[in-house]
Amino acid sequence: MNSQTPAQSILGGVAEGRVVATPEALSFWGGVDPATGAVIDVHHPLHGQCLTGAILMMPSSRGSCTGSGVLLDLVLTGRAPAALVFSEAEDVLTLGALIASEMFGKPLPVLRVAPDAYAALSRAKTARISDSTIEAEGLTIPVSPPATAALDLTDADRAMLEGQQGVAVQQAMRIICAMAAQQGARSLVDVSQGHIDGCIYASPANLTFAEKMADMGAQVRVPTTMNAISVDRANWQAQGVPHAFGDPAARLADAYVRMGCRPTFTCSPYLLDSAPQAGESIAWSESNAVIFANTVLGARTAKHPDFLDLCIALTGRAPLSGVYLDAHRKARRVIDVELPERVDDAFWPLIGYLAGRAAPDRIPLLRGLASARPSRDDLKALCAAFGTTSAAPMLHIEGVTPEAEGAAAADADRVNISRSDMAAAWMQLNDGPEEVELIAIGSPHASLEECRALADALAGGKCQAGVAVIVTAGNQVIADAKRDGTFARLQDSGVQVLPDLCWCSISEPVFPTRTRAVMTNSGKYAHYGPGLSNRAVRFGSLADCVVAAQSGRVPVKLPEWLA
């Protein structure tokens, strides 16, 4: 934004409505019900409010890349906010609004407003937005037009933009160039692989977009994996999933397979043999995967919104901005963590959750954790939980992650995470009863090591009658678990292992309808679960989950390392 301009139009249009302002970012996926436009994130200040027709003001978005699909669906059904006003850079919802305008002729204004003007506007009851001004009671804010970056395109880029590679590629390149302009990119970068998040049936709009692109003849030009989908593709009919949901969910997966994507159906693509190497430029969507790729693998990918992930896969090109560049991988906040003694596996998602709260809008460097020697699965859990509370595409952990040395920017500020912070967050994530009927493992998809750890902890014991234990995992992990006997051990204890879908997309009756409360070791699902399932959710360690599986209850108390 020009420093002399109070407001900048990112996507043009006119709107008026009541002002709904919040100081806390919101994930539209898992946070807003596309069927009603109401906020369902029980941890968010706007919980219960309907956003339809509102001028929605928040610093940025956070959480899932699927938010773009939820917004597109809200636009297409007439349930969307009238306009989006941010104070910081934002990609996920902006991309959803861009698709609505570009492909469906339904514009939704998106603006970025400077701090003083943003603060004044957030106090207004109603506002009117035009291409040149924002007007509210006693307030007129000038609006500058959308940025137009002079992109340095290659001959191949221009050929795609001119339609020489077909209409689908042309549409994809138009969208990429528009996003590059609003991100301030000057050129595009080659990517070696993609990962599609938009294959989750979060709303009918996801299917509308995918089938429209497939019908145009779209074909990916780089190796592209697929996220978890919303059904067990081979078994959903036998599982009793209604055709009204199962048919479009399966069609959505099929549309991406038709476009040449690999049917990997996992939200943990870093567990696949095709996982990228350090320094490799890739184009992944799915928030936990993006954060793990940047943080743990040292690969490079922006947190690409749904729909942009496919556009990049169709062209092999992404905007050269954000964490593709060295300067933007620096930590602008240092977080000193008070490390308790003898922590267990629940510590890592809890710290990820708190780190995201402490750095909702910037990359942090976490200090004080190296002596606890986190495993790869510990880091997986930390990254996933971080992505629920922060918009940042990565973090650093001193003495642990590959780019942590020298990662702190010269102007980085400092905050602390104390034991009392951990205790408060633990109790917030345990707002449920002692009795549970469902144990949820695998958000993100479980690794082979996690499956083995669960089998070892169960030690051949049976799960309590009336308690369901479900693990979601990718097909490659399930195949490996069958080969080494882990799968059979889990089945013998009464554990169900499901492929293709994950906890963030599971629905009844695969999600047992009789469930009143859920126990999970996932910080990500502990956050999203109450809004997605409309059930109470408990959070704890893998050992806590096993206690609950074998007894049907687990006490609501702090873990020993916090007590």
Image (spheres, rainbow, N blue to C red):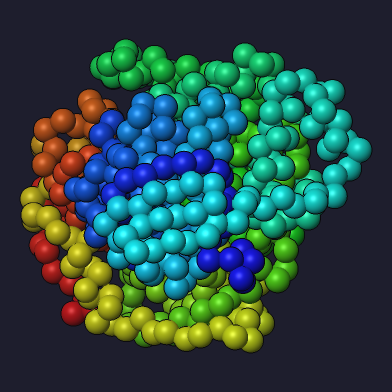
- Between 276 and 446, the one lying in front of the other is 276
Whether residue 476 sits left or right of residue 221 in the image: it is left
How many numbered badges does the structure rendering display? 0
> Could you tell me residue 211's position as x and y percent?
55, 18
Q: In the visual, does 54 lie left or right of 12?
A: left
Image side of residue 195 versus residue 341, left or right: right
Q: Residue at x 78, y 55 (%)?
A: 186
Q: Residue furthest right?
A: 155
Give me the residue at 41% from left, 32% from top: 75
| Furthest residue toward front | 138
417 relative position to 308: left or right: left
> Can you see residue 50?
yes
Measured along the vertical axis of the image, is residue 275 above or below residue 171?
A: below
- Residue drawn at (27%, 16%) of the image: 242
Q: Quadrant of the C terminus?
A: bottom left
Q: Nearer the viewer, residue 36 or 557?
A: 36
Residue displayed at 61% across by 39% down: 308
Measuring from the top left, give residue 217's x and y in whole percent. 69, 16
| Above or below for 424 versus 297 | below
Question: In this orientation, does residue 524 appear?
Answer: no
Residue 420: which quarter of the image? bottom left
Coordinates of residue 273 in the picture (x, y in percent):
64, 43
Image coordinates of residue 323 in percent, x first then y, are: 66, 61
Looking at this view, is 23 or 120 the one in front? 120
Q: Quadrant of the N terminus?
A: bottom right
